[in-house]
Every structure is written in structure tokens, then in C-alpha cells.
Amino acid sequence: MKAFLMFPDRDFEPSRDLPPQEPELAADLELDTLLAAMAGGDEFLHAMARQGIHSGLTSPAEITYRQHVLADSVTWPGVVRGLYDLAVEGVGAQRQVFGFLFRDSPDSILWRSQELMRLYVELLRRLAGVAREHGPGFRSAGFTRFFTMLTDELSDDYFAEMEAHLADLRFRRGTLISARLGTGGKGTGYVLRRHPPRGGWRDRLPGHGRSAYTFTVAERDEAGLRKLSELTSRGVSETANALAQSCDHIQGFFAMLRAELGFYVGCLNLWDKITAKGQPVCYPVPSPLGGDRFAARGLYDVSLALTIDGKVTGNDVAADGKQLIMITGANQGGKSTFLRSMGQAQLMMQAGLFVAAESFEASTCSGVFTHYKREEDAAMEKGKLDEELERMSVITGQIAPGGLLLCNESFASTNEREGSEIARQIIRALTEAGIRVGYVTHLYDLAEGCYTQNTGKALFLRAQRLAAGQRTFRLPEGEPLPTSYGEDLYQQIFGPQHEPAHG
């Protein structure tokens, strides 16, 4: 049995390696806050959310498939959480079977496996009950196929047959084993047999209905009892292994079901937290890899929304056909926040999640990368510029055409002329290679040069500042200015009685 709730044609891979840039993405895009909201304090849900958020789906069909499953989950949260709890029970069923650490003889394996199978049968019966009761209300292809599979494969006839087999394995009439005589008169070809059906009442009378001779092992004949146990073990060995493999198969099904449903339970946790704050969410519209779509209305930083009490200001952006989105303007005007929202939205869309916006449309990308400024190297092994160049070198070795690179104050550690020239060359090389770049900068030389040379492939946003110096945290289109209004911050901190020196 397969769940197929994450992909239409393959299993989810919860142990798949994360992308090499994951630590940088987590730090720069504040993904830990997002993942903590999805996990709700559960380590397993955190792991599934982390794996899911880095799915990196590039096929719009696969993204839409997952979105539809998520939409069903949002419509029926109680049912989905109940299914997840059943899967958790299934994964933990092994711990309920005594003798798990006993010797692995065939008879002990058989006993343990049949006890475990009885637990699985009960869980599967409950799972089939959920499918019959709630399946008709689900609309997504993923859940429809899943519930249809449960209804078809876990029928009443299936459970009746399973109960009959388990009843036979209790050996209430003894263990019936056949064997042949081999070389030297030794037994060979041991096979566990099903008892023939009982005859009429005459066959149950002493001396009637016997087709074989019997013998009795004396109570104190330890060697005889040991030999009889060995014969029994040989006879049940293949059956024990077959039943153990069946248990492993069902265990694997519950493990995969827990992993796939765990991702959607994390999505439900995030949905509840965001919507409780009155923030909008939407199902994004993905376009194929290599396109140039990027448009949003009310796009906001989901991590910020999760950590503050008030509502977060969203931004509109129309960047279709743009390879460079350069963001300039007033200090503390929301530039870095907007850059984070871009990266978060791209990752969430390509994980099949909803996005923190009123609407969002974008082409899928081959990978999301970040290049943010870092603190000074405490060990003083290299300068800040060396460190920045080294990190950029690593990124250029990993990023591919169709990728997205987000830079926040990159190469501001050197003088403006040198930093601007380095950044210009890197931006030109990346955009010509088909890589979209989002760039926050205070380097006027860089921003003004890119603006002057713009051939229509760049979009320039500027953090809005009102006449009195207030920040609106909105980023309309605007030409770069030679000032970031640092005096506003000076006056805010030191007060109007302190005039900054000019010279």
C-alpha cells in the first residue's frame, strides 16, 4: 500500500539530504521561526516541515497536486489530524508487543509477529472506517486515490481472511507439520500445514477419525522436549519469516503515512497561527522553470508576522520579465524584510504550501540562495571582503540557470567604488546566465549605475519615507537616491538638540 499524498507517483523521502545552502537559508530567511510554528513543539513534525519546505518542486503539476491535498486538509483538519494520530499509533505498535528483545528463534518470531499483526489489523480496520465515512467529502486527487485504495484493499472480506489466518496461527489444535526423510534418515522439507476441517461428531470420539499415530514426550524428558521444539521451529520457520515480512510492510506503510501526513499537520499548524493573526494567505500560481514570472500583492514576511503582535505591512511587486530586483531607500524602511519575504514565498510555493500574501505568481526556480552580510570573523583568519568573496564563489559553483539569489548589503565591507564594481560584475554575470537576483543595497554607485544601464530587465524599488521621516514599510517603484536618510535615525536616537556634523 502507498499513500502518495506528497507526490502523485512516488513516496516522500523524509531522510533525503537537505540542500547544501540550507543553513544559510535558515539563518537569512529566519526559517526557524516558520518551522517552529509548523512543529508546535513536536520534534518529528519539525523534521518533516524542514524536509518539506526544502522540497524544491519545479513542476507546476506537482506543486498543484500538493496544494490540492493541503486544501483538503484545511477543509477537514480534524480528519487529517485523526489520520495522523492513527499513523503514529501504527508506528508505535511494535513497542506494545512483549518479547521484542527475546531470542529470534522461529517460534518467538512467529509469536511476536502474530501479536503485532493483530494490532495492525485493528488499526487498519479503523483506517478503513475513516475512508468510508469521510472519503466522499475529499476532492483532491491525492486523498481521493488514498481513500479509494483503503476502501478497495481493506474490505470486509480482507479482514475476515486475516482473522481466519491469525486464528489458525494460534494452533489451538496443535502444530501440523509435514516432512520427508532425507539422507541418513534425517528429516527434510519441513512445511507447516493447515489442519483439515473437523468431521462429524463420530470423528471426535476416542479412536475414530485418526489417520496417524501419536507419541507422548515424558514430562522430564528435557532432550525430547528440546528436540520437539527444534522440529516445531523448522516447521514454522518459513511462516514466521513471511508473517514478519508482512508486519514490516505494514510498519513501513504507517511510517510513510506518518511522514506525509506530518507535513500537512505542520501546514495546518502554520495556517492556524497565521490566520489567527488576521494575516492573508493564498495558494500561489506556479509557472514552469525557466520562466520570468514574479508578481505579488500584499507579500509579507511570515516569520515577522509570527513574532509580533500587530499586523505586518505587505508589499505589491510586479517583476514579470525582470532578472534583477534592486531595493534601495531609507534605513529601517523594510528592505531586508521584503527580501526575506521573497525567499520565503519562493520556498513555500515550491513546497506546495500556501504563501503569505494576498496573491502570488512566480516561475519555479532551480534553487534559492542567499548572500547576506556577516559579522566580523572572530578568529581574524580572514577579512570581511575575503569572506564575502569566498561565500559568493561557493554560491556560483552551486547555483544553476533558473536559480534565485538574494543579496543583502553584499560587498558593503569595502569602499563604495570597489564594492559597487565587484557587485556589478557579479550581477551582470548571473543575470546573463538566466539567474534572477534580488539585491538590497546602500551603495549608490552600484544602484545608480544599474539604473542608468537598465535595458528593461531590472526593477527598482525604494523604501518609502514620508516628508516628516516616518517609514511606511512599503516599497513602491522608484529611482535610487544618493541618501539612505541616516539623519532620521540620528535624530531619533539622539534627539533634535544634537546636530550631526557635516563636512
Image: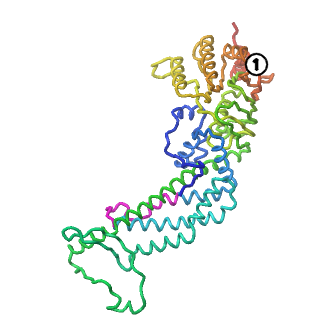
Displayed quadrant of residue 203: bottom left
Residue 395 visible to the viewer: yes
Displayed quadrant of residue 466: top right
Counting from the top left corner in percent of width and height, residue 277 is at 71, 45
Label 1 CA crowd tier, 10 Å (few <14, some 14–19, many 20+)? some
> Which portion, as a residue range, is magenta?
88-106
Displayed quadrant of residue 417: top right
Residue at the location (62% across, 30% down)?
Answer: 402
> Residue 284 colored magenta?
no
Residue extending farthest to the left is: 184
Q: Which residue is mark 1?
A: 479
In-image side of 451 versus 231 (left or right): right
Which corner quadrant holds the C terminus? top right
Q: Amino acid at mark 1?
A: Glu
Counting from the top left corner in percent of width and height, residue 415 is at 60, 12
Counting from the top left corner in percent of width and height, residue 54 is at 57, 39
Q: Secondary structure at mark 1?
A: loop
In-image side of 212 versus 85 (left or right): left
Residue extending farthest to the top is: 503
Residue 348 visible to the viewer: no
Residue at the location (57% across, 56% down)?
Answer: 84
